Image: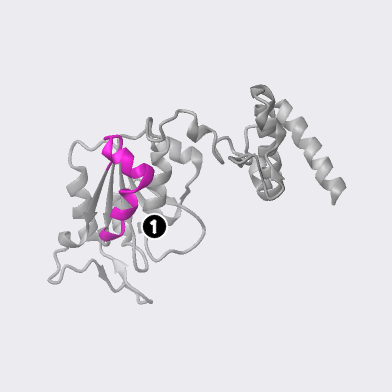
Amino acid sequence: MKINILTIFPEMFESVFSSSILGRAREQGLLEITLTDIRPFSESKHHNTDDYPFGGGAGMVMMYQPIRDAMASVTGDGFRGKRIYLGPRGRKLTTALARELAKEEELVLLCGHYEGVDQRALDTCVDEEISIGDYILTGGELAAMVLTDCVARFIPGVLGSKESPEEESFSDGLLEYPQYTRPREIDGLAVPEVLLSGDHAKIRAWRRRESLLATLRFRPDLLESASLDAKDQKTLKELEDSCFSES
């Protein structure tokens, strides 16, 4: 997959994209990330990319022309992918959306800044707006990093194991079960015996129950849309009864 990021601060990205899993994915040719500075495309004398908003108001707005030309430079006639603006009005980034985006051949991410982007750029240069959450950032660069990291995990080969992204939090709408590693006991705290049993069926059942319990305790809102079978529903009912009786 190729991801091209349009930004006025390209220097923010390299350390993040050169490290850890993303760095290895780039080295292996599984992920190509290109940073395109919007500033050189500006036709203004000082190559500024922002101006005062018509109608007045606080702050500055990113100009249409530099974005239009920067976008045209990275898409061209043969572009087959999706152009995305990281903004608060967009569809919320979820595991399902990340999995969907990972199937694209190419993504172009437009990072907004200041008080926003000229609407004409959003109308003509963008296919979709995506939000990473209901909060305010100083710009779209951090959001672009989050989206890239999230999507990359669903590109075959990036994690080194087909099962890894499917076993993590939110993969099936639930939080992940507790994890443990060596030593078996420390400070009087022991690893649950079932994880040492070697009985894979019992381990899977324990992990599923713990995943349901964690979701019930910390993010009960996720249960409304989670993928639950009849056995899950029964376990959840038992957990709910237990929690209510304890309280």
Highlighted magenta segment, given as a residue range: 11-32
Q: Position of residue 4 (x, y in %)?
A: 27, 47
In-image side of 100 versus 27 (left or right): right
Q: Nearer the viewer, residue 75 or 23?
A: 23
Quadrant where the N terminus lies?
top left
Q: Nearer the viewer, residue 139 or 63?
A: 139
Position of residue 68 relative to residue 79, above or below, is below
Q: Overall secondary structure of the magenta stretch?
A: helix
Q: Position of residue 186 (x, y in %)?
A: 66, 47
Question: For residue 190, what is the image quadrant?
Answer: top right
Q: Which residue is mark 1?
A: 142
Position of residue 243 relative to residue 103, above or below, is below
Q: Who's the residue at 32% across and 38% down the image? A: 25
Residue 82, visible in the rendered structure: no
Q: Mark 1: few, some, or many residues within 10 Å (few <14, many ≥20)?
A: some
Question: For residue 116, what is the image quadrant?
Answer: bottom left
Q: Nearer the viewer, residue 185 or 47?
A: 185
Judged from this view, the residue extending furthest toward the right is: 245
In-image side of 236 versus 167 (left or right): right
